[in-house]
Amino acid sequence: VWSRSSAVFLIPIGLAAGQRWEWAEPAMGTLVRITAYAPNAAAVRAAFARVHELDDRLSDYKPDSEVSRLSGQAGRVRISEDLFRVLSISHELASDSEGAFDVTLGPLVRLWRRARAEARMPSLDMLERARAAAGFRKLRLRPGEVELLVEGMALDLGGIAKGFAASEALAAMQERGATQAMVAVGGDLAVGDPPPGAAGWRIAIRHEVLTLSNTCISTSGDTEQFAEIGGVRYSHIIDPRTGIGLRNQGEVTVIAPSGALADGLATALGVMDPEAGRALLSKYRAVRR
Ligand code: ADP
Ligand code: MG
């Protein structure tokens, strides 16, 4: 039933108390899947509208997204409330992880995307130039405004935007009374109240099935996205200390109170040593599975 086209699939299944709605649509560079129990599809439609709105603001693939437009230009720029919220959480995660999670790695992410396409290591010179334009301390955040301190900076929210969108889409349904719902933005999930008669939403990760409600869960790993150069696999997660993709990345799953945190923490843990990672998780009341 899932499709890569932009067509919309609504599958109503009759139930005594309302209906079960399932809807899948590509957005945010992945497939977004929503399941909800509700009398009609209005809440699900609202959730999708919210996802697309966030995609338009936060995507670094869309040349005229808010994020793409502000990248490259040093100086102060007014930003939307959504972007401000994502950047605030990002900044806190960056400080708390000593920069392991860093949304200013845009220049490095682009460099590695090209390396992956060409199957060739970036030159040291290009690596150095990209590193000079990265680093969360070169970004200043004030309410409603961001300031990029260095020329050539680029923001990349690939490690947090999907989780944020999952939570926001769930909230859009909850506001409309559809509290028994779940949203999956690729591997970033937000779940609300359990389905009728169930203890929770059954979520399969690696070797176990978890039963969850009113929480968020994100899995990050290099199973799909990596560059293979000279027989070595470089993850799409970059170690900010070296500017190079992780080489020994396993899968990391994190359960956290918000989607942005689950997503961001799962990305950060790939970079951090285990002990620092545990301390970071406990600060945010998050757990690793
Ligand atoms: P996925 O996109 O597969 O769900 P992640 O949530 O781990 O995986 O995000 C990886 C993406 O995050 C990369 O593609 C890149 O856009 C961005 N990124 C890479 N390294 C970092 C990092 N150290 N901190 C924050 N974001 C990063
Ligand atoms: Mg992530």
Image (cartoon, rainbow, N blue to C red):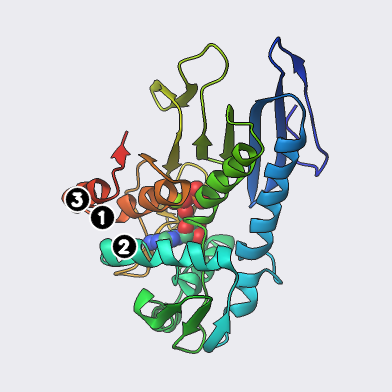
Mark 2 neighbour density, 10 Å: few (under 14) some (14–19) many (20 or more): many
Whether residue 232 is situated above or below residue 121 in the rendered picture = above
The percent position of residue 10, horizontal first and vertical second, equals: 79, 29
Residue situated in front as seen by the camera: 172 or 117 = 172
The amino acid marked with disc number 3 is Ala
Foreground mark, 1 or 3, reads 3
Residue under numbered circle 1: 272
Q: Is residue 228 visible?
A: no
Q: Tell me, yes or no, if residue 270 can be seen here.
A: yes
Mark 3 sits on what residue?
Answer: 279
Judge the density around disc 1: few (<14), some (14-19), many (≥20) Cα neighbours within 10 Å. some
Q: Percent position (x, y) of residue 89? A: 41, 61
Q: Amino acid at mark 2?
A: Ala
> Disc 2 or 3, which lies upstream in sequence?
2
Give the SS element for disc 2: loop
What's under tag 1, amino acid-wise?
A: Met
Determine whether, in the image, residue 138 is placed left or right of residue 22: left
Distance from mark 2 CB to nearest ligand 1 atom below 8 Å = yes
Residue at screen point 47% across, 56% down: 159
- Provide the residue designation for mark 2: 100
Q: Quadrant of the C terminus?
A: top left
Picture residue at 61% right of the left edge, 66% below the top: 60
- Where is residue 98 shown, x and y percent of the image? 26, 66
Q: Nearer the viewer, residue 218 or 87?
A: 87
| SS class, disc 1 | loop
* Residue contact at pointers 1 and 3, CB within 8 angstroms: no
Indicate the quadrant where residue 90 lies: bottom left
